[in-house]
Amino acid sequence: GRVQSRENITVSSDIRINNYQVDPTNMRVRKQVAFVAQDDSLQTTATPREAIKFSAKMRLPSITTDDQIEILTDKMLEELGLQHCADTIIGGQLIKGISGGERKRTSVGVELVVKPALVFLDEPTSGLDSFSAVQLVQVLKKVSGAGSSVLFTIHQPSSEVFNSFDHLILLNKGRVMYQGAVAGVPQYFSDQGHPVPPNYNPADWIMAVAQSTPEHELDEAGFFPSDVREEEKGLDPSDDNEGYLFGSTGRNSFLIRNPGKKFNDKQHISSATEVKLLFARELQNVQRNKKATAARFIFTTFLSLLVGVIFLGVGGKDPSDPVNFNGQFGSLLIILMMSMFGTAMPSLLAFPEERPVFIREYSTNHYSVSTYFISRLCIEAIITAMQIMIGILISYHLVDLQMNFFLFFSIMYTLAMTSTALAVLLGCAVEDPKMATEFLPLLFVPQMLFAGFFIATHIIPGWLRWAQYLCSLTFAVRLSILAEFSNCADETPLPGVENLCKRALMSNQANKDDVWWYWLVLCALFIVFRLSALFLLKKKASKFF
């Protein structure tokens, strides 16, 4: 979970449940506490049924059968009033889906599958119309009646919503202005000299009083009573053998039976199952987000056709002619850069866009960072392979390149995966998708500068030359020109005619004996960038502000 803060700030706290001091990062405690954020963070291409079922499969013990999860999901949809939209896509800003109230109830349902003892919600009615707000509060009332303690912040509730509260805490600048039953609000405010006017919503009145009356006047009127409670010594949860930490509330409790026992990690599903479920969801997301997926392949097809038509048949012409050779070398570079740019850009934006969903699910123990990373890698590997295959099927044959087709695919695919790994690393470093776009020059410009075709790498100042080993395009260019121009480089040119193929190999420092080294560097860059991104994502996920 998110337990660390940034820089050198240390956060300390004394959190108690039934006077037992608890660590909120402890799995046993976290399983009993649910939190629903103000902004819904749900998979936009999933349905309410799929979202609730996914949460249940990820968080319930591994011994829970599929039939039990189906029954739980159907029951949850019924209680939340989501049967009519259970199989409608949730949607988001760019994808049409269910309404705001239905989305909020889905967010509640996702957290309720583990039957928590405490449910916290941050302004759950924000952005909802009055009817949807009442519906949501009625759902929360059912949750409370089932045995959970429900606590949430709210601003200016309607009279119907206000009167449904069991207990009210009114805060003003961090101080408790009133705490008690809702029915006692009119009398309390009347005693302090601010009676609620007739036919007036008490919630509106207390907000008006709190905001329009200076704090010192409220203090003088007695609105901020001193806390005269004596703080008892916190109890040690390890001594809780009778179940008082998360014991029954006296109602139809579904809380944990033997809280004295430690949470058994073996109850959680295996890492392989996590990867399987995450991969299935990612694949479904790709299939349903048809516009984004189609646009990716359409652009690849169009650009490949454009390059192929412009450089039509140039690869089969005599490379001893400088004009022909420039066309061959240029087409090769353009195809390599096109594969790098086309695959890296979507990956750069993917992690910042999905960060809210990942943070919520990771902090609630849906899965680990590593399993999330592996599932994303599998999807990226498949999509990238398809994109590269479509691109070179068109450009390779139109340009009439001379190297082996499968060798060219291997070079292109390795370059694309390495560039994608770097894009993922940069994407994990930022939180805002808009900020991620600012990193595009950092991703692409150094690659072209150190690739060797604008300036020979041995001319670059020595103190900066090391950066070439971080640029995958450099080694992909060397592998490509070796594969394409090695044969003509070995040919003896006519007297007075320079061997352009040999010059290209020398100027780019491409050596046949170092082919294994170029492949090794590309693979090493892929591994280093991926592991660095994994470390960075885990570190980012542990920060809560």
Image: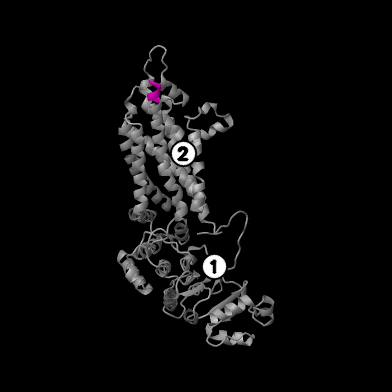
In what element is the residue under mark 1?
loop
Question: In the drawing, what numbered circle is on residue 123?
Answer: none
Give the answer, above or below, for where 143 lies relative to 313. below
Residue visible at 59% across and 75% down in the picture: 171
Note whether residue 535 is visible: no
Give the answer, above or below, for where 211 lies relative to 315. below
Task: Report x, y in % for residue 373.
Answer: 43, 50
Dot in front, 1 or 2 = 2
Q: Residue 510's quadrant in the figure?
A: top left
Where are the magenta residues, as a range? 321-325
What kind of residue is marked 1?
Val
For marks 1 and 2, the one nearer the N-term is 1
Residue visible at 40% across and 22% down in the picture: 322
Residue 366 inside the magenta-drawn segment: no
Task: Report x, y in % for residue 241.
Answer: 49, 72
Horizontal placement of 191 versus 372: left or right? right
The residue carrying mark 1 is: 22
> Tag 1: Cα neighbours inside 10 Å, few (<14), some, or many (≥20)?
many
Question: In the drawing, what numbered circle is on residue 525?
Answer: 2
